[in-house]
Structure formats: C-alpha cells, structure tokens
Amino acid sequence: ALILPAAVYMLQDPSAQAAELERTFIAIKPDGVQRGLISEIVSRFERKGYKLVAIKLVVPSKEFAEQHYADLKERPFFNGLCEFLSSGPVLAMVWEGQGVIKYGRKLIGATDPQNSEPGTIRGDLAIIVGRNIIHGSDGPQTAKDEIDLWFKPEELINYAHNSENWVYG
Ligand code: ADP
C-alpha cells in the first residue's frame, strides 16, 4: 500500500480535504474492554460518520500510563488511575473527521458518569468516575500529543472512505 504524508493525501483527495483530517485519540480503558463494550463504543463513532485510521489492543506499562496522564500527576487519584490503565488490555484508536476532537468528547460525555447525559457513552454505560470506560483527547494539542505517544506514524492509515461523499456532501 502507498503511504503518503497527510498534506500530500489532502491534495490528492478532495473528500479528505473536506474532512480537514482532524484526528483524535480515543481509548477504551480496561473496564470497557473487560465489560465487552468494544463493539458498542466503536459503533457509535463509526455510525456518526467518523473514519477509523488506527486501532490496536495494548497493555500499557505503568510508566506509559503515567506519561499518558502526566497532566494529572498532582491529583490524588493519579497513582490509582495509572495502575488501573495498565491493569489490562486497552483498545487504542485514532478517529478522523470534521470536528471529531470536540464532538468526540460530546459522544463520550462528562468525566463523572453521575453527570454524563443519557445518550452519551459514559452516561449510558458507566456509573463511577474511576471506571468511566473511555478516554478521549480534550483538545487539538492533546490529540496530537496522545496520537504521537500511542502510535507510530506508519500505524496511521490514510485512505478514502467510500461514505465520505455522503457524510460530507
Ligand atoms: P477526562 O477523562 O474526561 O478527560 P480527566 O482528564 O479530568 O477527565 O481525568 C482523567 C481520568 O481520571 C478520568 O477519565 C477518570 O478515569 C479519572 N478521574 C478523574 N477524576 C477522578 C476522581 N475524582 N477519582 C478517580 N478517578 C478520577
């Protein structure tokens, strides 16, 4: 397969340009994987019209989890959170689409499932903040940093999705 840098790909494929190639990092945490919620969660992003560009099942080390959650290292729950993230398989993904960073957070719902609206992933599928089943980047810079941390460039697949013309017109 031909692998091209994103900028070249955009020039070649007008529908990719329409989608502006915005990408976010989404991970199903060990609780979501163990509870059999992979297909439910993937399906919500897929049905919305976003494009899956990378996916892998990994068991992160504690050190890796600490890197991922570095911004939270002063918080009292930091250690427990990193122990938890490294306790089993995590489904790491990159999703692409217009506005996917911000709207992906809407699909996920508020951090504490007690406050997440019904209809959101956490609202529908989780109860407590320490077991809220999914992670999503909270802005463009964290999205970039998290994608770089979890994936090698060659693991991100540039491809045209045949529904793009129908999703974006
Ligand atoms: P989000 O995952 O919604 O971006 P944060 O970045 O604030 O939220 O927190 C990262 C993760 O830390 C949360 O998803 C949750 O799993 C955990 N967490 C946040 N607050 C608490 C808390 N008060 N007690 C236990 N775990 C928490």
Image (cartoon, grey):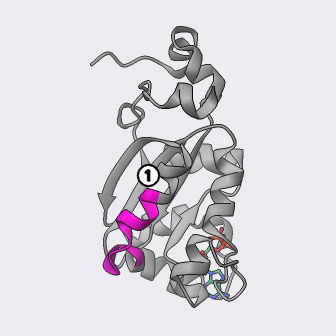
* Place of residue 65 in the rendered image (x, y in percent of width and height, measured from the top left): 47, 68
Residue 58 visible, this orientation? yes
Using the image as rendered, state which of residue 149 and residue 32 is in the foreground.
32
- Quarter of the figure with residue 165: top right
Q: Amino acid at mark 1?
A: Met
Pinpoint residue 87: horizontal percent, then vertical percent. 35, 79
Q: Between residue 70 and residue 168, name the one nearer to us.
A: 168
Disc 1 marks which residue? 93
The magenta region covers 32-43
Ligand 1 shows up in which quadrant of the image?
Answer: bottom right
Residue 36, horizontal then vertical, whole percent: 32, 75
Q: Secondary structure at mark 1?
A: strand
Q: Residue furthest left?
A: 1
> Measured along the vertical axis of the image, is residue 101 above or below residue 43?
above
x, y percent for residue 40: 41, 67
Q: Is residue 78 above or below residue 162?
A: below
Q: Is residue 39 magenta?
A: yes
Q: Quadrant of the C terminus?
A: top right
Question: How many labels sit on residues?
Answer: 1
Front residue of 14 and 77? 14
Q: Is residue 97 magenta?
A: no
Residue 17 higher or lower than 28, as above or below = above
Question: Is residue 60 visible in this depiction of the protein?
Answer: no
Assess disc 1: are there few (<14), some (14-19) or many (≥20) residues with their C-alpha within 10 Å of its C-alpha: many
